Amino acid sequence: MVEIPESVRDRLESLPHVVGTGVGKKRVDGRKTDEDCVVVFVDRKVAETQLDDEEVVPRSVDCDGETLPTDVQEVGDVTALAAEPAREAERTERLRPAPAGVSLAHPSVSAGTMGSTLLETESGDRVVLTNAHVAAPIGEASEGDLVLQPGPADGGDASDEIGRLLEWTEVTTEAPNATDSALVSVDPDDVEEEVLGIGPLVGFTEPAIDADEEYTKSGRTTGVTTGELRGRDARIRVGGYGARPAVFEGVDLFTPMGEGGDSGSLIGIDDGGFRATDLLFAGSPEATIGVPIAALEAEHGELSVVGESGNGEDGGDVPDETDEDGPAGGFGRRLRDRLERHHGDVREENGAFRVDAWPLDLLVVPGEDPDWAAERARGSDADAVAIAVPVDTDGRLPAIPAGVAVVRVDP
């Protein structure tokens, strides 16, 4: 994906009506073409005749030696979404266990959405995911605060506690933000393994500009809706965080998929199992804005899906038990998800994972005993670089960086 130089962003975003920039495909009459472009997001389009020459968005810009066309796209007034009346009564009821996609909020917030099913942090906490502006209002939140399901706008009170605020991002108008997110510590028995109206959450993946994917979300206000990805790596001004707009960097922009109260929903691809790509946090009648899962994990650490939906025990390709033929189910699913997110297509091969990570062909071998995994890796074909990844005693994926190598073994 091309990177837009900051000087180019600064120049474009200084023009009248421009609220942000990103990378995407040029759109003609609302339809996506195959042409890469720099997307210039405006609150409203105006005729060039109403602007001075120096105020007109240029037809093309230079991005590190590559000339790309611009595409001006209207997004309206983008803001963090305040709760509006819900379309489906079930989503505003008290539910135990509660599926993702229903009403949730801090006691001093109206209502947003419980975005995820049960997740596990690197430190072993069991949590659900939502927005900071839903569960941790700016200047008011403290660790351990109550989080209600349903939210106060839907009749929730202290008797409707579903969890406690664990950690969150402090959104500021003084510097660019990467995410608007919060983790809520919950009792696993209070959380269902389903995303309401979609099905199980099976993992995470990256959105792709070049793919013709349909993106889906399940939210408290508008239920299940779908949309298209319009731009990635967007820098955009978002209202609703104070007297001045907050700037967010590295976010994704979709066609409109939500309304007020849908904040906190997971956006993702439903292709036989729901894989989340983004956390919805803002929008307008013309657009929806999401924080990529990679940005969430950069902020909060790795998040793993808990339960049958995320551990390979519900129709996944990964064997259920650790033995000489395959990796542990939960560990294997999380490892496979990580590989897919960073390297693309992954093939299971005799209990290991084969990855085409150009310029290398990787064979990733999980196992409880690192020496055993390393020995199996050494037995792989000579054109592969083999990596042995140990499983710890409770089957958790070790806290390692975006790459997966813990032990590197010569073929």
Image: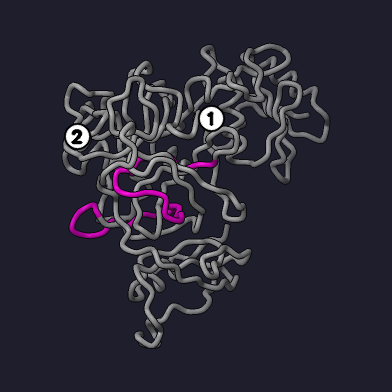
Compared with 98, 81 (above or below) is: below
Residue at x-position 29% and y-position 49%: 81
Taking depth in this image into account, of 220 and 56 the one nearest to the observer is 220
- Distance from Cα at disc 1 to Cα at disc 2: 30 Å
Across and down, in percent, residue 317 comes to 66, 25
Q: Quadrant of residue 395?
A: top right
Asked whether, in this view, residue 390 is left or right of residue 191, the answer is right
The answer to whether residue 162 of the structure is visible from this angle is yes
Residue at x-position 54% and y-position 41%: 269
What range of the chain is rendered magenta? 240-269
Label 2: which residue?
Answer: 152
Tell me the amino acid under the disc marked 2.
Pro
Tell me the amino acid under the disc marked 1.
Val
Label 1: which residue?
Answer: 202
Mark identifier at residue 7 = none
Local crowd at mark 1 within 10 Å, few (<14), some, or many (≥20)?
A: many
Across and down, in percent, residue 286 comes to 39, 60
Residue at x-position 41% and y-position 72%: 12
Local crowd at mark 2 within 10 Å, few (<14), some, or many (≥20)?
A: many
Taking depth in this image into account, of 52 and 83 the one nearest to the observer is 83
Asked whether, in this view, residue 359 is left or right of residue 210, the answer is right
**Counting residues from the N terminus, which is met first, the one under dot 1 or under dot 2?**
2
